[in-house]
Image (cartoon, rainbow, N blue to C red):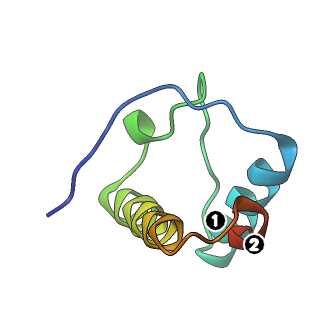
Amino acid sequence: MINIVKKKLEFDDELKKKIEFICGFCNTIPTIINGNMRDYTDLLHLIILNNLENTNAKLIRMNIKQSDRLI
């Protein structure tokens, strides 16, 4: 099941570059308005974001440090 949580995200330039890299791989351009991408994206990108969040949650449960979770 997909659980969509809407909240403003504040992120640094490094994360923005990673998002742009992933979107470049998908041959699309990210739209970031007021830090919330979910309101302006399509289903494919919502699924990708959800997948990234789930992977991150699993790594957190495995006690992987944030610095080691970054690509």
Looking at the image, which is closer to me, 71 or 62? 62
Looking at the image, which is closer to me, 15 or 61? 61
Figure quadrant of residue 68 = bottom right
| Residue lying farthest to the right in this orientation | 13
User: Upstream in the sequence, badge 1 or badge 2?
Assistant: 1
Give the vertical position of 52 relative to 14 (above or below). Answer: below
Q: Secondary structure at mark 1?
A: helix
Q: Who's the residue at 59% across and 27% down the image?
A: 33
Q: Nearer the viewer, mark 1 or mark 2?
A: 2
Image x and y of residue 28, in percent: 60, 63
Quadrant occupied by the N terminus? bottom left
Q: Who's the residue at 22% across and 51% down the image?
A: 3
**Residue beneath disc 2:** 68
Residue 53 vs residue 25: left or right? left
Q: Residues within 10 Å of mark 2 (few under 14, many from 20)?
A: few
Image x and y of residue 56, in percent: 51, 66
Q: Who's the residue at 60% across and 22% down the image?
A: 34
Quadrant occupied by the C terminus? bottom right
Figure quadrant of residue 39 = top left
Going by the numbered disc 1, the residue's amino acid type is Cys
Q: How many marks?
A: 2
- Residue 23 marker: 1
Q: Residues within 10 Å of mark 1 (few under 14, many from 20)?
A: some
Give the vertical position of 30 relative to 60 (above or below). Answer: above
Image x and y of residue 69, in percent: 68, 70
Q: Who's the residue at 37% across and 56% down the image?
A: 46
Going by the numbered disc 2, the residue's amino acid type is Asp
